Structure formats: structure tokens, C-alpha cells
Image: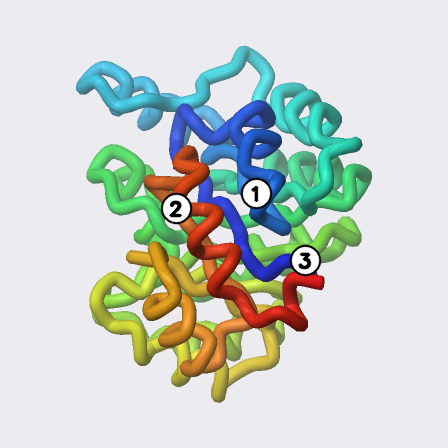
Amino acid sequence: MFTPPLALASLSGEADAAWAEAGSEWAGCAFVGGVSLDASTREAARELVARDRSEFLPADPIAFIDDQLAALADVALRPGVNVRATSTDPLREAARVAADRDAILEVNAHCRQEELCAVGAGETLLRDTDRLREYVRVASETGAAVGVKLRAETGVDLPTLASDLEAAGADCLHVDCMDTESVVGAIADACDCFLIANNGVRDRATVREYLDYGADAVSVGRPSDSPRVLERVHDALPEVTRA
């Protein structure tokens, strides 16, 4: 799906095209966003801003996504965009833009902020399998490569969910493993989706652990703006995957 098998994970309000380009020397993919697509998720984002969190709140989220992906057209990595939604129409529009830009459309089933969960977005989707599968199906019908950002340690059976999402059309699963690194192995056994492991990726030991469990790639989140960390993770990847 991308090489080298190192992704930059989205950081709300910070992960834009400039951020992605800055990390492109080491990464094979960067997820800009998260971008709140509809009225409910945008209101939740405004509430987050009111308590001093950084959020993207462009006047036109779809145009913003197109502009960000266009800015990465000549950058040597595969772009992705992490999106939040509570309805299918804007999700479909975002997926069409991603398809046109050869980007990965990543459905956010990961954010655990109370404001987003209250409107049925983010981590709430992990327990609403029918709706999450519908989101994946709608997005995949546009021809976009579709990913889902998941979180472990929520009480949800992620291997079963992974199999369901693959059947719905998911190409890629991006898993925040929290403190349960072994969940990568269980998910890898349950489906054939491209699997990105996230959480605590900093050095050779953490890269090796996730790859040994069956991850196809790893991602770096909060220190994704640190060249020192990115270089160290990149250099820990197997030579054959960095060619």
C-alpha cells in the first residue's frame, strides 16, 4: 500500500500538508486530519476548540481535503485523510476526492473525546458495527482505498470487527494498540487487510515487536514532527521494505 512501511498518524488541527511534506523523507504515508465532515462532528470540534484543543474547522471540509491532497501531489509519499462523520453523504464526497487523488480515506473510529462520542463519532463506531460497516461500504464504492482507525482496550472484539470491515470493503486497518501490542497478531490472523500498528513506535525494539506480531507497517503519532524519531524508526525498518 505504501513504502517505506512507516506512516505519520493524524494529529487533529496539526496534521496538514506541510506537516506531511516535512516527514516525507522518512515516511511512506501521511494521514492529514482529522477532518470533521458534517454538522454534528463540526459542532463537536468547536466544543473541543473551546476547551483549548487544536482542530481543523475549514468553511468547506471537502474543499479543504482536496486542497490538502493536491498540495501533496508531488511529494514522495502516499497521502491519506482521516475523517469523522455521522452521516454517509459527506463521507462519500470525501472518498471521491480521495479516490481522485490516489489517497487513503481513513474513517475515524478512534477518537475518544467525549464531545465526539456524544454525537456518535469516533470510538463510538467500534460498538456500532452496522453503521461502521456502512461507512466503509459507501466509501469503498467510490473507488477509494479505504482504511479505518481503530483503538484497542475498549472491550470490542477487534479481530471479529476487522473481518467484518474487510468484508465491507476495507483495505487498511490502522490500530492504536494502547498497551496491548499482541492485538496486532489477532487482527492479522482474522483478516487480510493491510495492517498499520500504532502506539509507542519510537525505536528498533518497538518496530520489531509490531512487525513480529504481523503488522505490515507502523505509524508515529505525537512525535511525527521530530526528525530524530522518524529517522530512528525508518532506520529500524527491514532493508527490503525501505528500498
* Amino acid at dot 3: Phe
**Residue denoted by label 2:** 229
**Residue denoted by label 1:** 30
State which quadrant residue 79 falls in.
top right
* Amino acid at dot 1: Ala
Side of 73 relative to 171 (left or right): right
* Amino acid at dot 2: Val
User: Which quarter of the rendering shows the C terminus?
Assistant: bottom right
Front-most of residues 215 and 82: 215
Side of 120 relative to 107 (left or right): left
**Residue 40 shows up from this direction:** no
**Residue 71 shows up from this direction:** yes
Q: Secondary structure at mark 1?
A: strand
Side of 134 relative to 116 (left or right): right
- The x and y percentages for residue 148 are 51, 57
Query: In the rendering, which numbered label is found on residue 2?
Result: 3
